[in-house]
Image (tube, rainbow, N blue to C red):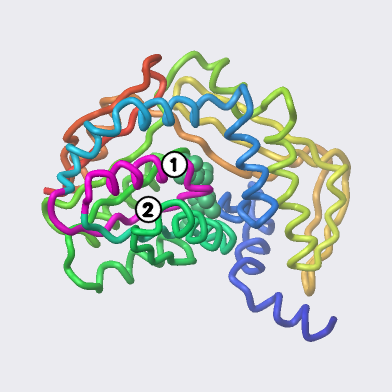
Amino acid sequence: MGNFTTGVKETRFYNDVISGLSGFPKQLFSKYFYDAIGDKLFQQIMNCDDYYLTKCEMEILELQTEAIIDSISADDYFELVELGPGDGTKSIKLLKELTHKKADFTYIPIDISHSVIDNLEALVADTLPEVKTSGMNGDFFDMLNQLRNSNGARRVVLCLGGNIGNMTVGESHAFCGKLRQSLSKGDKIIFGFDLVKNPKIIRRAYDDSEGITKRFNLNLLERMNRELCSDFDVKKFEHYCSYDPETGSCKSYLVCLQDLEVHFPEAVIPFKKDEYIHMEISQKYTLSQISDMAHKTGFVVDRNFFDSKKWYVDSVWEAV
Ligand SMILES: C[S@@+](CC[C@H](N)C(=O)[O-])C[C@H]1O[C@@H](n2cnc3c(N)ncnc32)[C@H](O)[C@@H]1O
């Protein structure tokens, strides 16, 4: 146990958690939701009735695949880099169509979750054996640096689902600026953005009636118990979510139900009754915010692809 806990303290996960829980307000990075259990829970979220995002984006990818592929000019060799692919159900649609069109490309999925990369590589090898795949496991902020230094092939980046939404507007601008530095003029990005809409619809998506989002949030406390030897009693925490239509920010929290202490190797974190941990942001956008972000970070919006309700957009950007 001694050696194990010493190892734990040297991980980035431990250091991020202790610094996030020692500040005010307490917060955790949402990227840590995704261990093997978190990946499965996220799949359940995508399939639940209240979570409209996946259905909207699937509709776009199913009904407008040809036009999307035309917009990325898939005639010459390119690298298709996907940031945070999750279970890959959406990407597979594009990969199938690209294969059908005999496009010459290498698929490079990048994800922080080991199991996502392992499962996706197996899925692509199984269903589309002709696709060259080269998965990268790690934080896409770090991986962008590695990409910057590699070969010079034309790149198309996919960043679908809730990925960009899990950053604040300021963080998204910084992220797109950094992404631009690892791309060349003419490279493309397909960004999924959830659009502003009736606040009740948005809030329900993050506080679903089946309680899956609640389990997804609590799993991060359980993950810390499993991997960082902490002693969270998850029954003492309650999931809460708010949406502010003025800022377009939907935020998830875990609220502590009583005064208590949580023990980690070499750290004790006190909680007051009703104190919260900020778990995740899911930012919603207007179309003018999206084009403003593209312009300010070195891109232009080429085309926008909407679902039939206009709740969601896959926005194709070109680096200028
Ligand atoms: C909200 S899910 C979206 C999955 C997929 N894009 C979709 O639309 O269904 C976020 C995905 O990004 C990954 N992820 C989150 N933060 C990350 C980070 N900082 N670096 C790399 N992967 C990350 C997660 O493991 C997960 O697979």
Bin the neighbour count of mark 2 within 10 Å (Cα to Cα): few under 14, some 14-19, many 20 and up. Answer: many
**Mark 2 residue CB less than 8 A from any atom of ligand 1:** yes
Q: Which residue is mark 1?
A: 168
Q: Which residue is mark 2?
A: 82
Location of residue 261 by image quarter: bottom right
**Mark 1 residue CB less than 8 A from any atom of ligand 1:** no
Front-most of residues 20 and 45: 45
In this figure, what is the number of numbered marks?
2
* Amino acid type of the residue tagged 1 in the rendering: Thr
- Residue at point 45%, 51% (across, down): 127
- Residue at point 34%, 59% (across, down): 130
Front-most of residues 15 and 52: 52
* Amino acid type of the residue tagged 2 in the rendering: Glu
Secondary structure beneath dot 1 equals loop
Q: Is residue 87 magenta?
A: yes
Secondary structure beneath dot 2 equals strand
Q: CA distance from mark 2 to mark 1?
A: 20 Å
Bin the neighbour count of mark 1 within 10 Å (Cα to Cα): few under 14, some 14-19, many 20 and up. Answer: some
| Above or below: residue 6 compared with residue 103 | below
Q: Percent from the top left, x then y, of residue 235?
A: 87, 42
Front-most of residues 283 and 78: 78
- Residue at point 72%, 40% (across, down): 254
Front-most of residues 124 and 234: 124
Discs 2/1, front: 2
- Residue at point 40%, 59% (across, down): 129
- Give the residues in magenta: 75-103
Q: Percent from the top left, x then y, of residue 205?
A: 59, 26
Location of residue 305 by image quarter: top left
Disc number for residue 213: none
| Above or below: residue 265 compared with residue 58 | below
